[in-house]
Image: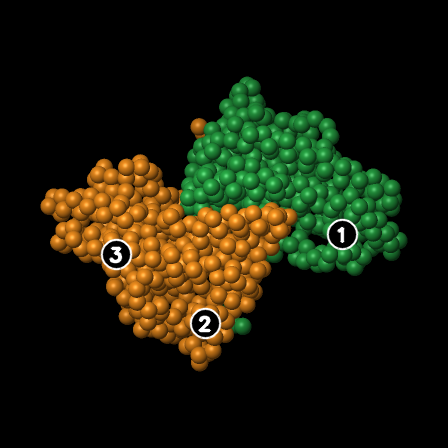
Chain colours: A green, B orange
Amino acid sequence: MDTPWDNRYAQRTQRMKSSAIRELLKLTENPEVISFAGGLPAPDVFPVEEFTAACETVLKELGAEALQYGATEGYHPLREMIARHSGRYGISVSPDNILITSGSQQALDLIGKVFINAGDRILVEEPTYLGALQAWSAYGAEYVTVPMDENGMVTDALENALRSGVKFIYVLPNFQNPTGVTLSLERRKQLIEIADHYGVPIIEDDPYGQLRYEGENLPSIVNLDNEFRKNGSSEYAGNVIYLSTFSKTLAPGLRLAWVIAPTQVIRKLVQAKQGADLHTATFNQIVAYEVARGGFLDRHIWLIRRVYGERRNIMLDAMEELFPPGVEWTKPQGGLFLWGMLPKGMNTTEIFKVAVERNVAFVPGASFYALGGGENTMRLNFSYSNPGQIQTGIERLSNVLKESIIAGK
Amino acid sequence: MDTPWDNRYAQRTQRMKSSAIRELLKLTENPEVISFAGGLPAPDVFPVEEFTAACETVLKELGAEALQYGATEGYHPLREMIARHSGRYGISVSPDNILITSGSQQALDLIGKVFINAGDRILVEEPTYLGALQAWSAYGAEYVTVPMDENGMVTDALENALRSGVKFIYVLPNFQNPTGVTLSLERRKQLIEIADHYGVPIIEDDPYGQLRYEGENLPSIVNLDNEFRKNGSSEYAGNVIYLSTFSKTLAPGLRLAWVIAPTQVIRKLVQAKQGADLHTATFNQIVAYEVARGGFLDRHIWLIRRVYGERRNIMLDAMEELFPPGVEWTKPQGGLFLWGMLPKGMNTTEIFKVAVERNVAFVPGASFYALGGGENTMRLNFSYSNPGQIQTGIERLSNVLKESIIAGK
């Protein structure tokens, strides 16, 4: 059907592409397929009973408020709770430093809207989170990349990348999506020093930081940056914008996340959010507050860690046992994902098509490369499938990989 | 606090302004103030019991789905319900023509993102909905305006406005925000014919269409456009993008609205929405579907009509009795707002300051003028305050107006 809209798209719309992951996920909807492709939390750990009780309480006690329009900044008690919680981890912020967003994806979009002019260069890890590329490319962002190894972003390559002039650095330090890799303490400090030297601010995206299954928690970049600038003070220095979310600890279907930023940046993000969706659903914010307060969230995260940690172990053990020689993979200490690397010259997009026919799915890694490359890589999710499915899925996938390696493609 | 973010804002951020309404609303938070300023539905008509029952049912029967990530397009049964409902009113669309958005504000933002290049001219009514100006100005829109009278947009002025070249026409035909005026049937037809002659498509924003308290329903522009193009067929012709919402019929705190558009436009809006917030909260969509299905929404709209119709009558009667000569106002047949016009030379922003001191509030009308003007106008909301408050508030306001008119400012 031809309509007068067809030739009226904005220039930016030509740059928009449907997320490769979302298109691929459609192929994996067949219930026979064991999918390691999505980034989905396990529904087994959704606190359904707590949500049921919270909805009842909130509608009974605060129904008129919960169903009404609300402040763009977010529900104040929820912002206070996040501020207190952040204080526990060493960042001293007030609710005025916090904006509630409709998922972290909206935080990325609003940051793009407020900061990115067409042609601006953003420094990202290679590979990096696809959703950030998608959000920012709509504003005409261009990318400068820094490679990663098993200790995260290779900070030795940073100076060279920064010399070209970048607007900000985007980093996922904990159990990165897609690689599962964690930025080492030494490199966190290096990143902060080099960024400071070049006067470039940092966006720290931390959806998975609380989901650590082994090893010691590392201080966040926002904390280390404060220490660096303030001689150990916990007062928020404002150089690092920090993003986190309830999607992985409570439930993604609520679309609830938050930004920590300097108050003047929050004001700009609030103006952008007024035009974008007025505010995040009041009902969801109050229900999440009701579920999370009183210590439940801390207890619940223990459960998630146990369940996902076990699934990670099962996947790693099965891969160790079954995957053919020549395939390498990361051993994440937390999060939802690990990263597979096949011999050079192999193409995981081609292998994906065979895998789906054999009822197992993953995400070909090339989507996560801002400047192309990564054709021999793949992302595997270990949070969504149950232990039996993980074992069977890895068996299927290892057979596909063996055949592909023998066929040399 | 100076941070490296301060000098990094995008050019569009310079154009963003905090909504004047939202800033003014802060002045009206004092509980002594009777506020006709907001656009809030009455919490008295929120179906709290039905929401409580629906939350329980949804979490019990569909908890894993309701709390999980969902499709960007929206919850399929909800899209099917909207398609059926649209069919009842004469537009034959499929779920593929429907995108669920996080409130109509997001629909406006996504339309801006997909269609507006910096410098594009958008034709709007004068005055028009502030949220649309806010959403589109961020993409660099410029505006061409057409004046309004008691029959809506003055279509005789359209041709002249269209000659300058516009990307699309934005119209709120029913009980317009801010004026409460309804576009007459004759002018709807003229609008469609003139738009067709110039090959310009239309965005029909219809948040209040179901809230009519007197008079006959008029066919929507999307319907009339189909009849015009298809010789009376109900098949969706695609020229008119239609927006509506559950904010005024169920509850705004859910942030649930929808767009009806050609499938290829929906695909572009979906790509933009992937980058903007992935999808609208799954939980809210399923709960709204559960509340709305089975005929409840139709019955509930009867209740809203009765309550708001009574409030409108009380406000109009009190104004008739108390307002000083020289003040004129619209008599809306539906919706949430009416529009006051003071003698030329008076300034409602100044009067607002006095009014708030006397514990009554409205919105100065100048905010709704895309190109400036309207200093002597005001928007009054009649849905939120109860009958006693409306009577008292109009008494207070009429005293302020009398004094202002005597003082001549």
User: Which residue is the extreme one toward the left?
Assistant: B406
Query: Circle 3 sits in a helix, a strand or a loop, which is it?
Result: helix
Residue A14's x, y, as percent?
55, 59
Image quadrant occupied by the N terminus of chain A: bottom right
| Element at label 2 | loop
In this view, the residue in front, B17 or B385, is B385
In the picture of the structure, the residue carrying the numbered disc 1 is: A34
Residue B90 is tagged as 2
Looking at the rendered structure, whether the residues under marks 3 and 1 are on a common chain is answered as no
Q: Which chain is home to disc 3? A: B
The residue at which mark 3 appears reads as B313
Question: For numbered disc 1, what is the local secondary structure?
Answer: strand
Q: Is residue A68 above or below residue A208?
A: below
Amino acid on which disc 1 is placed: Ile
Labelled disc at residue A251: none
Q: Observer-nearest residue: B151 or A149?
A: B151
Which residue in the rendered view is the most extreme toward the bottom?
B231
